[in-house]
Image (cartoon, grey):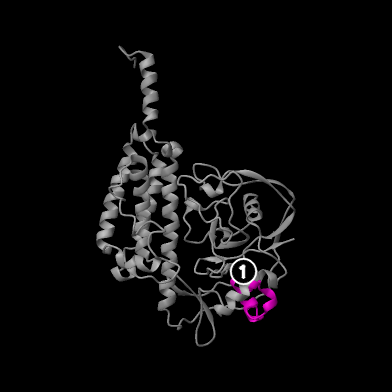
Amino acid sequence: MALTGVDASDISAASMHCRFIMSTSLSTMIRLRAIQNRTRELFSEMNDLHYRLQFHPELSAAGWHLAHGHFYENYWLHEVIQQNDTLTADKSLLMSDSCPKAERGPRLEPLADAIKTIAQQQDANDLLLMEKVPPLSDHPLFADEYIENHIIQHYAQHYENICMIQHQVNIRNDRGNYQPQQPLQASPAQRNMAQIAAGEYLIGGEQPFAYDNELPQHKKQLEAFNIAITPVSNSEYLNFMQQDGYSRRELWSDAGWQWLQQHPVSHPQHWKQNQAQQWYGIDHQGAHDLGADDPVHGINYYEASAYASWVNARLPHEHEWEVAACLEQLSDTARVWEWCGNSFYAYENFRAFPGEKSSSDFNGEHKVLKGGSPHTRPEIKRASFRSFYLPHQRHILSGLRLAFD
């Protein structure tokens, strides 16, 4: 059908204008809506007390993670981009550094009220993203849908934290009565290795998905190394325990041994033993059999390092892990967070973005973890993603994979 009375240049200009004011893409909106809904659904059967209680000293109350994730969404979409702090003026509770973890839960509004308010505001924010037009859409944080992806990934991280809290709830409530159908048996350490040649390899992520600590993408020269194809398993770790791994000083670093003397543990945090001395696991659903070949988790950096010493191996550097994963030489990369041997540090020419303090933990004290857990959302499952925790922390779903020189 012919168009009459319309100049071709007008059509071209109109087309360009439509592209210019295009709202957030449907695929990104679907991902945002999914993580918003999934996070709220974690509270569908939770009572108000459970929502407020702190079940581990290094985790906030579950409700704080819910409220903080939404506060963060409002902070970027309204306060930063639109200079409107109506929804975020009070930062005394929901900014990460504003309130001690132990004090957060009692200050939360009732669970039912929180869910209602958050759902309504998320609806409004989603509508804003679908209908944004200039000058709002001109804000540089909307370029390549950067801030939308940033918000999605932030939700994903707190989703996993809430799942970790549920592990702690079940650990506290377990009475030690579970009878595994197939009791865990120890097995020797395996040396199923992939050989990675020396060379120059690309390290780091790509925008708009990468966090600032994954940038800038750069090349690194690596020496040849061998890395285990699979993470250390439950049965292999039980062998370490049975061979007195927790009492042999020579296996532990000075810092690790000092931690162990102050915290005399002898097994992963997510393991328990019944009266028949049978080991079983605890997760977000409760007690379960420990699969012999499943990756061990619930150990800290010190424990992982001691195990590696026990088998005359080491923890891989994060660059080695990332390269091997990108070369598709590793299996089970999303079943457990894996401790790496290096401290968390800023890449050369690092630039904090989008906030000035968005990566303030380059203090040499944190260790890098790679991989993911069953609770890790797809939004942050990538080889370049850098999780980081203090070496004593073991409430996370963390295990290890071995490297060999």
Question: What range is drawn magenta here?
Answer: 232-254
Depicted 389 relative to depicted 265: above or below: above
Q: Quadrant of the N terminus?
A: top left
- Residue 39 or residue 215, whichever sits in front: 215
x 49%, y 61%: residue: 374
Q: Is residue 290 left or right of residue 88?
A: right
SS at badge 1: helix
- Residue 334 or residue 252, whichever sits in front: 252
Depicted 75 relative to depicted 400: above or below: above
What is the crowding at mark 1: few (fewer than 14 residues within 10 Å), some, or many (at least 20)? many
Q: Quadrant of residue 62?
A: bottom left
Residue 240 location (% of width, % of height): 65, 76
**Magenta-span inclusion, residue 386:** no
- Residue 356 or residue 176, whichever sits in front: 356
Q: Is residue 49 visible?
A: yes
**Magenta-span inclusion, residue 249:** yes
x 36%, y 18%: residue: 11
Residue 191 location (% of width, % of height): 71, 66
Q: Say which residue label 1 marks.
A: 304
x 26%, y 55%: residue: 117
